[in-house]
Image (spheres, helix red, strand yellow):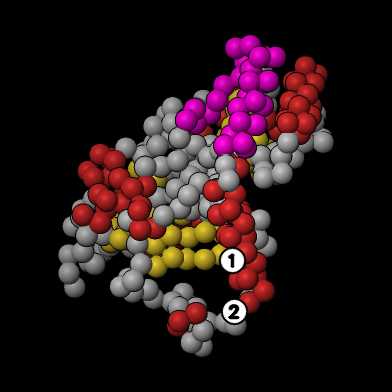
Amino acid sequence: MSARTDRPHVITQVTEHPAILETCRSLERHHGTEVTYLPVGGDDGLVDPAALAAALTERTVLVSLMAANNETGALQPIFELARITRAHGALFHCDAAQAAGKIPLGVQEWGVDLLTVVGHKMYAPKGIAALYVRQGVALEPLVHGGGQERGLRAGTENVAFAIALGTAAELAATELADGTPGRIAGLRDSLHRRLADALPGRVHLNGPDTGRLPNTLNVSIDGTLGHELLAAAPGLAASTGSACHSGTHTPSPVLTAMGLDADRALGALRLSLGRRSTPEDIETAATALLKAAAAL
């Protein structure tokens, strides 16, 4: 067995989605794989390409890094990270679930070997996804059986959902071309300004100011807890910077990995806009949050 496959080495980052992190932990537990979890910058949540280069070894077989963070919207420098990985001879996988439909995706331009997209993140039904595999990359199926899906996964294809995913991708491509992301980013920034102006010095952006998804706003408001703020604004659909287990709230692992203290992480809100968001929606959301913050 070659040095590259004798106890293989995988690299990811500390702020990856649990879909990747838990898979890596399973590889560690059950297959003896060595996994390196790269740190991210405290202000922007980005992986330093130099840190990736330093982590690569002769046993590295795969690097898996997301295009956009699901909580902060931070956009990783995928082109540079993939270039470093492939120059070393390892495969590069990109989780583009959050990015698909919001920013242009280019597997050739980015130089990735594998890329995943998920339907429900781009207005397709839940339960459908797609994996891009660069020609020449050999995969071992997770589910063995019939020859459907080119022998990579058993089971009869869900044709209706596959068509829905393709249609959603076509609609997303049209919106990317007609400037929809710019419009949504403008609404996002309007919401941020509305909150910051009404609560001077209390609203803190979590993640990068630029280089993030156009629809994502993650902020913490001093003196409030995210789950209490949302409970006081029942008409608002949003998520917090914490996870709730049996009534106990713990800070978001993503924000914690970025170095945010517990108070700021527990006070975080992730506000996501959609293709149908309007200026009136922004005013409604801002008013509800400000009213809730005043009541706490």
Residue 225 seen in the figure: yes
N-terminal-most mark, 2 or 1? 2
Q: Nearer the viewer, residue 22 or 65?
A: 65
* Residue shown at 46% from the left, 74% from the top: 142
Residue 221 seen in the figure: no
Q: What x and y, as percent, mark residue 203?
A: 61, 19
- The quadrant holding residue 124 is bottom right
Q: What x and y, as percent, mark residue 56?
A: 23, 50
Location of the C terminus by quadrant is top right
Please say if 115 is above or below 261.
Answer: below
Label of residue 157 in the image = 2
Residue type of the residue flagged with mark 1: Gly
The residue range painted magenta reads 182-210
Horizontal side of residue 24 vs 191, given as left or right: left
Horizontal side of residue 217 vs 284, given as left or right: left
| Callout 2: SS | loop
Residue denoted by label 1 = 166
- Label 1: few (<14), some (14–19) or many (≥20) C-alpha neighbours in 10 Å: some
Q: Nearer the viewer, residue 263 or 209?
A: 209
